[in-house]
Amino acid sequence: MPPETVVLRPGARGEAVKLLQKRLHQGGYYYGKINGVYDEQTKFGVWAFQKHRHLRPQGQVGPEVWKAFDRPVRAKPLVPRGEPDRVEINLLYQLLVVYRHRRPVLVSHVSTGAKVRYCKDGRCGNAITPVGDFHVTSRAPGWTTGRLGSMYDSLYFVGGIAMHGSSKVPLRPASHGCVRVPLATSERLFDIVKIGEPVYVREK
């Protein structure tokens, strides 16, 4: 059966799912296992692809998605005159893109600051991911636990705000200000992004 006629949903298994995972991985959208199981990490890769191609992010993969794979579209960068090697974070689309030599090499669905006031353990703050031009200032490999929760492979770029792996990366902005990244993708992100790398955060 041609792939474009196959409809996949989370929980699906088989060769069509494996093909989907391979296509997503080739485009830099997915870094989980190529195992033919449509699991949560696969869903996050599908969301990243759909957002990057200006499709509505959803778990279902149908003709619209399969056809989009065959029509490569070069999405416009947030910062056209940014450094050739950089990270861009789009707060509107909840999307992170890593560029190398001005070409996107990693694209991830993310969840950023929820834009609400919060209080925890007697301390309060605003759950905001700041907009601006930053640089990665420090890195923390593996799991670390702070006052606001656990973080994996953290890349700090302004104060206590970091890009980091998380087990909870919903479609909506839900963090205290950090940029949550799916766990499988966060490992690859940590591998390629080093201290000093430019990080551009925009809300558009």
Image (spheres, helix red, strand yellow):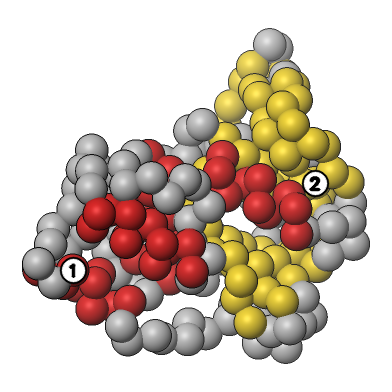
Quadrant (top left/top right/bottom left/bottom right) for the N terminus = bottom left
Label located before the other in sequence (2 or 1): 1
Q: Residue 116: percent from the left, percent from the top?
A: 53, 37
The quadrant in which residue 6 appears is: bottom left
Residue at 29%, 78% in the rendered image: 68
**Dot 2: within a 10 Å radius of its alpha carbon, few (fewer than 14), some, or many (20 or more) residues?**
many
Q: Residue 145: give x, y in percent of width and height.
A: 73, 21
Identified at 77% across, 59% down, the residue is 193
| Residue 44 visible in the shown view | no
Q: Where 92 falls versus 177 (above or below)? A: below
Identify the mark at residue 156; answer none if there is no mark.
2
Residue ID for mark 1: 3
Q: Which mark is residue 69?
A: none
The residue closer to the viewer here, 126 or 16, is: 16
User: Does residue 188 appear anywhere in the picture?
Assistant: yes
Compared across the picture, whether 10 is left or right of 144 comes to: left
Q: Secondary structure at mark 2?
A: strand
Give the mark toward the camera: 2 or 1.
1
Disc 1 crowd, CA 10 A, few/some/many (<14, 14-19, 20+) = some
In this image, 176 relative to 142: left or right?
A: left
Alpha-carbon distance for marks 2 and 1? 40 Å
Q: Nearer the viewer, residue 176 or 40?
A: 40
Q: Residue at x 32, y 47 (%)?
A: 36
Where does the image place residue 71, in percent across and percent down from the top left? Answer: 32, 86
Is 159 or 5 nearer to us in this picture?
Answer: 5
Which residue type does callout 2 highlight? Tyr
In the picture, measured across the screen, residue 95 lies left or right of residue 10, that is right
Depicted 175 relative to depicted 191: above or below = above
Mark 1 secondary-structure assignment: helix
Q: Give me the residue at 74% from left, 71% from top.
A: 86
**In the rendered structure, which amino acid carries the disc numbered 1?**
Pro
Which percent across, then down, holds residue 30? 48, 56
